[in-house]
Amino acid sequence: MTCLIQKMTSCEPPLTEIILMNPYTDKDSPRDKQSIFDIKAKTTEGELINIEMQLFNQYDIEKRIGCCF
């Protein structure tokens, strides 16, 4: 898992350990939508990593991502 995330994110310094976390996000209010990530992790330096994988190409990736690499 660490090698996969390292290749996907190019973290510096290189990852030596990750901590898998609860993939469910908390809602800030009752009207908020709950998100569930496929992988939610934290590096030993405290950087959060959220990964969501798609099985099918829905041609809407620009709408779904929060940042670009």
Image: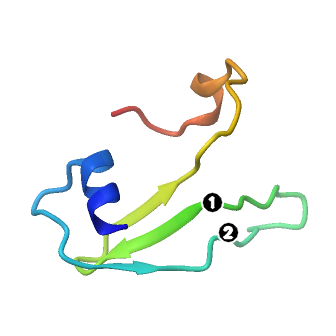
Q: Residue furthest top?
A: 59
The residue shown at (72%, 58%) is 35
Q: Quadrant of residue 38?
A: bottom right
Secondary structure found at label 1:
loop
| Residue 20, percent from left and from top | 47, 79
Q: Quadrant of residue 63?
A: top right
| Residue 15, percent from left and from top | 19, 68
Residue 26 falls left or right of residue 49: right
Disc 2 designates what residue?
Answer: 25
Disc 1 designates what residue?
Answer: 37
Please say if 65 is above or below 52.
Answer: above
The residue shown at (33%, 34%) is 69
Disc 1 packing (10 Å; few <14; some 14–19; many ≥20): some
| Residue 50, percent from left and from top | 49, 58
Type of amino acid under label 1:
Phe
Q: Nearer the viewer, residue 57 or 34?
A: 57
The residue shown at (70%, 61%) is 36
The residue shown at (20%, 55%) is 11
Disc 2 packing (10 Å; few <14; some 14–19; many ≥20): few
Q: Are marks 2 and 1 in contact (CB under 8 Å)?
A: yes
